[in-house]
């Protein structure tokens, strides 16, 4: 970021101050209000952070009006088309695409850390079988800090790197174990000769009594879904990871916090909710009735998988998802998936309806992802788990960037207090009936 050459003038209670304006490489300028309180005694008010940049970052860029998503400057479409997930992990974490030798070493580092401490397998037995796999993920990932003490010193760059590699490597194993436990099947250990996505599919769907051959087209689709979910700037879960990490908490605890935040239906839980919605609509002929209900504010029904805080245009990830959905269904020989038909009809109806046009509501990444994941064989309860698995590299890259930022300090928002002013305690006998 260049030093401020322009400034904004603010007049408050008769006092005028200059606020520095900073420019990024691309994207909107930001007004630096860091000294506002010291200079005026006032805070800014921005619930939901709709106008607030919480940090400086070099990782991911989104242009919501144009529907652009860049990882370290590379368009998501190019990475999804030509790259793979582990290369994307390297890019997000280290800032550049790897050279062949860097790639080889990185693959080895990740591949050789896929197993989890054997004692961790016992955690799972403590959960009810019907526990939501996201509940299990929050606990087990948080518990990694109890198993990998030797990589929890956040001030040691090598420990930070080892913890990061461990999480990228072990999250698929933990996610697959959460799934296997949920359905009452034995855990399948990782197979390091397979690719990241193929290994994950095998850990989820293989059983000890049968040979399991990974379908390369489905593994490629899985890999692409991971790429599309790998990072997304300062969204709610990433901000949660940064905020948790700003206190100096260890990286495993921070990622567990991110997973907890991702679980919400307005964020990562939307893919589960979107598929549920498609199932409830059930038939393309019922789409118009559903759209009418969505537009009726008293119904409190939202079109799940539509709308985004940042994208006011087609989410570029949704386009790739739509293409991948067709590829997966064709590979599996599913000719007329009724849910895909409902989704197409819903998208068509929404995109030509003034309610959605005026509010700039377009399909987001979750609109089609559920159809693919369901076709791959995942139950809806696993959808957000897969998102968490893929987003781990984004969280960990953002966490690393924050820790390495010399201006980093504990995150501590302020508030507009609207509660009672000071008052004196009344004994119970004097508080009326
Ligand atoms: N269906 C119907 N109306 C919607 C939708 C929707 N999906 N999304 C927004 N709107 C309407 C709101 O009711 C509001 O209308 P109003 O101006 O008449 O009051 C207007 O559009 C603006 O909506 P906000 O809630 O202010 O927009 P915000 O940026 O806060 O919300 C969000 C973004 C949470 C993603 C929202 O669009 C939503 O709930 N979508 C459905 C859930 C979803 O798909 N989430 C996944 C996001 S992507 C991700 O996390 C990976």
Image (spheres, grey):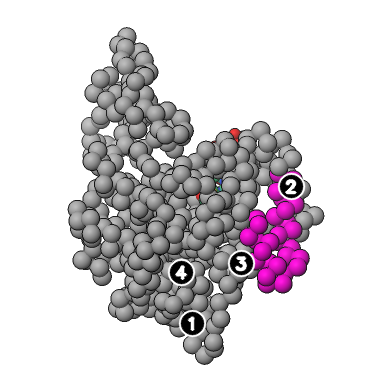
Q: Earlier in the sequence, mark 2 or mark 1?
A: 1
Which mark identifies residue 374? 3
Q: Earlier in the sequence, mark 2 or mark 3?
A: 2
Measured Cα–Cα span from mark 2 to mark 3: 22 Å
Dominant SS type (magenta): helix
Residue at 59% x, 75% y: name it. Answer: 215
Q: Was residue 337 drawn as part of the magenta stretch in this picture?
A: yes
Q: Which residue is mark 4?
A: 196
Which mark identifies residue 348? 2
Residue 114: x and y, percent? 37, 72
Residue 75: x and y, percent? 52, 47
Quadrant that contains the C terminus:
top left
Q: Was residue 410 drawn as part of the magenta stretch in this picture?
A: no
Which mark identifies residue 185? 1
Residue at 59% x, 69% y: name it. Answer: 218
Stretch in magenta: 322-350
Q: Is residue 22 above or below residue 228?
A: above
Q: Earlier in the sequence, mark 1 or mark 4?
A: 1
Q: Earlier in the sequence, mark 2 or mark 4?
A: 4
As helix, strand or loop, the secondary structure at mark 1 comes to loop
Measured Cα–Cα span from mark 2 to mark 1: 41 Å
- For disc 4, does the CB lie below 8 Å from ligand 1? no
**Nearer the camera: disc 1 or disc 4:** 4
For the residue carrying disc 3, how many other residues have a C-alpha within 10 Å: few (<14), some (14-19), or many (20+)? Answer: some
**Nearer the camera: disc 3 or disc 4:** 4
- For disc 1, does the CB lie below 8 Å from ligand 1? no
Residue 131: x and y, percent? 45, 69
């Amino acid at each position: 970021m260049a030093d401020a050459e322009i400034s904004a003038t603010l007049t408050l209670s008769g006092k005028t101050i200059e606020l520095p304006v900073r420019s990024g490489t691309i994207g909107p300028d930001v007004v630096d209000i860091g000294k506002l309180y010291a200079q005026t005694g006032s805070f800014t008010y921005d619930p939901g952070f709709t106008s607030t940049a919480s940090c400086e970052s070099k990782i991911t860029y989104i242009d919501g009006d144009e529907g652009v998503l860049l990882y370290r400057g590379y368009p998501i479409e190019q990475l999804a088309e030509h790259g793979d997930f582990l290369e994307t992990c390297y890019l997000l974490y280290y800032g550049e695409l790897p050279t062949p030798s860097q790639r080889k070493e990185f693959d080895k580092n990740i591949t050789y850390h896929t197993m989890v401490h054997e004692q961790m397998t016992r955690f799972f037995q403590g959960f009810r079988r019907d526990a939501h796999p996201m509940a299990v993920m929050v606990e087990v990932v948080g518990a990694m800090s109890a198993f990998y003490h030797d990589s929890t010193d956040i001030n040691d760059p090598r420990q930070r790197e080892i913890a990061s590699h461990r999480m990228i490597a072990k999250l698929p194993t933990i996610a697959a174990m959460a799934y296997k436990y949920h359905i009452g099947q034995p855990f399948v250990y990782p197979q390091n000769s397979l690719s990241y996505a193929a290994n994950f599919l095998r850990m989820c769907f293989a059983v000890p009594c049968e040979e399991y051959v990974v379908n390369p087209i489905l593994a490629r689709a899985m890999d692409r879904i991971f790429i599309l979910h790998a990072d997304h700037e300062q969204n709610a879960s990433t901000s949660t990871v940064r905020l948790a990490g700003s206190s100096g908490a260890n990286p495993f605890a921070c990622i567990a916090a991110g997973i907890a935040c991702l679980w919400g239906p307005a964020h990562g839980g939307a893919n589960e909710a979107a598929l549920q919605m498609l199932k409830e609509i059930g038939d393309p002929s019922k789409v118009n009735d559903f759209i009418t209900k969505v537009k009726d504010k008293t119904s409190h029904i939202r079109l799940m998988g539509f709308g985004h805080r940042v994208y006011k245009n087609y989410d570029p990830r949704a386009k790739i998802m739509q293409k991948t959905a067709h590829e997966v269904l064709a590979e599996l020989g599913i000719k007329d998936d009724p849910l895909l038909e409902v989704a197409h009809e819903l998208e068509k109806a929404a995109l030509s309806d003034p309610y959605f046009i005026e509010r700039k509501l377009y399909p987001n990444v979750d609109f089609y992802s559920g159809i693919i994941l369901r076709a791959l064989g995942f139950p809806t309860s696993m959808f957000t788990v897969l998102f968490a698995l893929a987003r781990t590299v984004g969280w960990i890259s953002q966490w690393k960037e924050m820790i390495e930022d010399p201006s980093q300090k504990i995150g501590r928002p302020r508030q507009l207090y609207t509660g009672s002013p000071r008052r004196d305690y009344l004994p119970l006998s004097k508080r009326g009936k």
